[in-house]
């Protein structure tokens, strides 16, 4: 359960913003999306490898 402490007279928009930030940090939405479509561990590992190669190439091109 997410609790957002409010100061007296605090704007409701600010409180909502705080709540959204805390909710985002918990990672609930991200985990839900990951669980909707199962991905084999080999596919996950391949994606991580391809991303690492891409980032490394970007860094090399920058130098």
Image (spheres, helix red, strand yellow):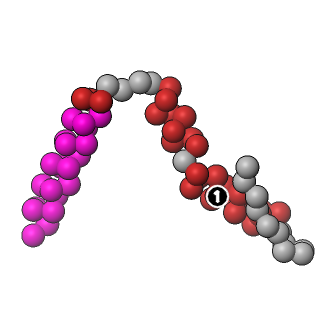
The residue that mark 1 highlights is 22
Q: Is residue 54 left or right of residue 27?
A: left
Residue 62 placement, left or right of 47: left
For the record, the magenta segment spans 44-63
**Position in image of residue 55 (x %, y %):** 20, 54
In which image quadrant can residue 10 be found?
bottom right
Mark 1, Cα crowd under 10 Å, few <14 / some 14-19 / many 20+, is some
Judge whether 47 appears above or below 38 on screen: below
Does residue 23 appear left or right of residue 33 in this picture? right
Task: Tell which of 22 and 58 is nearer to you.
Answer: 22
Task: Give coordinates of residue 32: x percent, y percent.
Answer: 54, 34
Q: What is the number of callouts on the image?
A: 1
Taking depth in this image into account, of 3 and 20 the one nearest to the observer is 3
The secondary structure type at the circle numbered 1 is: helix
Asked if the magenta segment contains residue 49, the reply would be yes
Residue displayed at 71% across by 57% down:
19
Who's the residue at 15% across and 62% down the image? Answer: 59
Of all residues shown, which one is farthest toward the right? 9
Magenta segment includes 52: yes
């Amino acid at each position: 359960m997410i609790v957002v402490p409010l100061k007296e007279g605090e704007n409701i928009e600010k409180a909502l913003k705080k709540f959204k930030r805390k909710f985002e940090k918990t990672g609930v939405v991200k985990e839900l999306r990951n669980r909707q479509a199962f991905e084999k561990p080999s596919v996950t590992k391949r994606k991580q490898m391809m991303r690492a190669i891409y980032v490394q190439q970007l860094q090399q091109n920058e130098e």
